[in-house]
Amino acid sequence: MNTEEGEPIVGYLVFDDFESALDRAEAEGSACNLPYFRGDGATRYKTYPLELSNGKWALNIIHYSHLTDDEISSLKTSVKFKT
């Protein structure tokens, strides 16, 4: 997804729990009709949730095509992943 100026939107969607992050990743995969949803392959997610140092979960959205205005306004430009 790009800004109105054509620049890619970069950042992370942050979720309180793994299930919510995974549901959002699956929604993007479905909206993009990835092979899993077409029934001809295994690719289901563009990105998979990663745990943050604070116990929350993040999705890197650089290649996402379907973001709501609320999601765009809540993007985090940087996060700290759990080691």
Image (cartoon, helix red, strand yellow):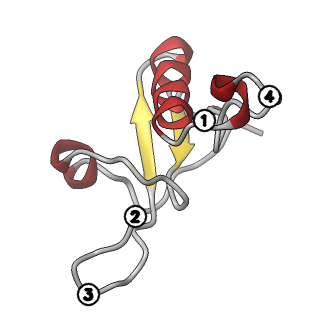
Q: In whole angstroms, how far apart are the C-alphas of marks 1 and 3?
A: 33 Å
Q: Position of residue 46 (x, y in %)?
A: 64, 44
68 lies left or right of 54: left
Q: Position of residue 10 (x, y in %)?
A: 45, 66
Farthest residue toward the top? 19
Residue linked to disc 1: 53
Q: In whole angstroms, how far apart are the C-alphas of marks 4 and 2?
A: 25 Å
What amino acid does circle 4 point to? Asp
**Dot 2 crowding, Cα within 10 Å, few <14, some 14–19, many 20+:** some
Q: Quadrant of residue 15?
A: top left
Residue linked to disc 4: 40
**Numbered label attached to residue 5:** 3
Front-most of residues 49 and 41: 41
Front-most of residues 48 and 58: 48
Front-most of residues 26 and 80: 26
Give the mark, 4 or 3, whose residue is nearer the N terminus.
3
What amino acid does circle 2 point to? Met
Q: In whole angstroms, how far apart are the C-alphas of marks 2 and 3?
A: 11 Å
- SS state under label 1: loop
Q: Position of residue 47 (x, y in %)?
A: 64, 42
User: In the picture, which quadrant includes the N terminus?
Assistant: bottom left
Residue for point 78% across, 39% down: 83
Residue for point 82% across, 28% down: 42
Would you place residue 12 above or below residue 55 in this image?
below
Give the mark, 1 or 2, whose residue is nearer the N terminus.
2
> Closer to the camera: disc 4 or disc 1?
4
**Dot 4 crowding, Cα within 10 Å, few <14, some 14–19, many 20+:** few
Give the mark, 1 or 3, whose residue is nearer the N terminus.
3
Q: Quadrant of residue 11?
A: bottom left
What amino acid does circle 1 point to? Ser
Residue linked to disc 2: 1
